[in-house]
Amino acid sequence: MKCFSALLISFIPFILNARTPSIILYEQRDVVGNIKTQHMREAILTYNLLLNTAELHIHQPGGAIGNTADLHQDGHKKAVFDSEGNIVNDGTNDGSYNFALPTQEPIMHFVLDILPWLIYGNSGGDPTTPAERLEAYVNDLESGLMKMRGSKMRNLDMESLERTELEGIGVFLSAIGSAGFKKIGDFLKENQPTSEDLDAITTELYQGLLDVITGNNPKASDSGK
């Protein structure tokens, strides 16, 4: 996803008093200090969820369900093609540059590439709203949850995590709390989970992340429960 430069991001708070990735990450400060000691399970689940989440629906807002994304072998450059094989350049679903590698740095990829896209869109002319973009992203997270059921859980070196990565984990912890992560853990262990189980998780992810992004986050003080 397209990400504004750090310089541009630093000036945006002064424009229309907009919320920015920096503000949202800073708001996780009370959660960050406890992640390594009290929320290792949530951190590992977040890491594995992002690692297993492919980016398909995020390139299909506006009804462009035929779009597919082609990631360059370097992991950074990406092109999007429509159903007829034409490169998409509509300002909404364009290909972009990944500042962090999705398959190697999934948490940083969320922080540097996905979160700015959720807030700002793909371009200045992107007509989609943060809620619409988040709906597309949660559809990809849903696919990631299903993929996790058939994948071996990867360990996460907690001591090597940078503060920015902890803040990225904090976004998800603030969104659904430890109770929400327990539902994810139960879903992964269930032999025959129902579609209702999955819908409940993705609905909570959507509403929780939307609350975090918009600043209406009643779960922030409850993230450790």
Image (cartoon, rainbow, N blue to C red):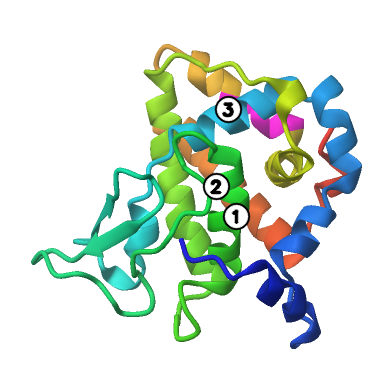
Where's the C terminus, which quadrant? top right
Q: Is residue 193 visible?
A: no
Q: Considering the numbered disc 1 on the image, is that residue within a helix, a strand or a loop?
A: helix
Mark drawn on residue 88: none
Residue matched to label 2: 109
Q: CA distance from mark 1 to mark 2?
A: 5 Å
Instruction: Residue at 81% x, 38% y: name it.
Output: 223
Instruction: Give the percent coordinates (x, y) of residue 152.
Output: 44, 14
Instruction: Residue at 56% x, 69% y: name it.
Output: 130
Label 1 CA crowd tier, 10 Å (few <14, some 14–19, many 20+): many
Could you tell me if the residues under marks 1 and 2 are in contact, i.e. CB atoms within 8 Å? yes
Instruction: Residue at 59% x, 16% y: name it.
Output: 155
Amino acid type, label 2: His
The residues colored magenta run 178-184
Residue matched to label 3: 184
Label 3 CA crowd tier, 10 Å (few <14, some 14–19, many 20+): many
Mark drawn on residue 112: 1
Instruction: Give the percent coordinates (x, y) of residue 65.
Output: 24, 62
* 32 on left or right of 56: right
Seen as rendered, the residue at the extreme left is 84
Amino acid type, label 3: Ile
Could you tell me if the residues under marks 3 and 2 are in contact, i.e. CB atoms within 8 Å? no
Instruction: Residue at 38% x, 42% y: name it.
Output: 54
Query: How many numbered discs sit on the rendered protein?
Result: 3
Residue 45 vs 127, above or below: the answer is above
Mark before the other along the chain sequence, 3 or 2: 2
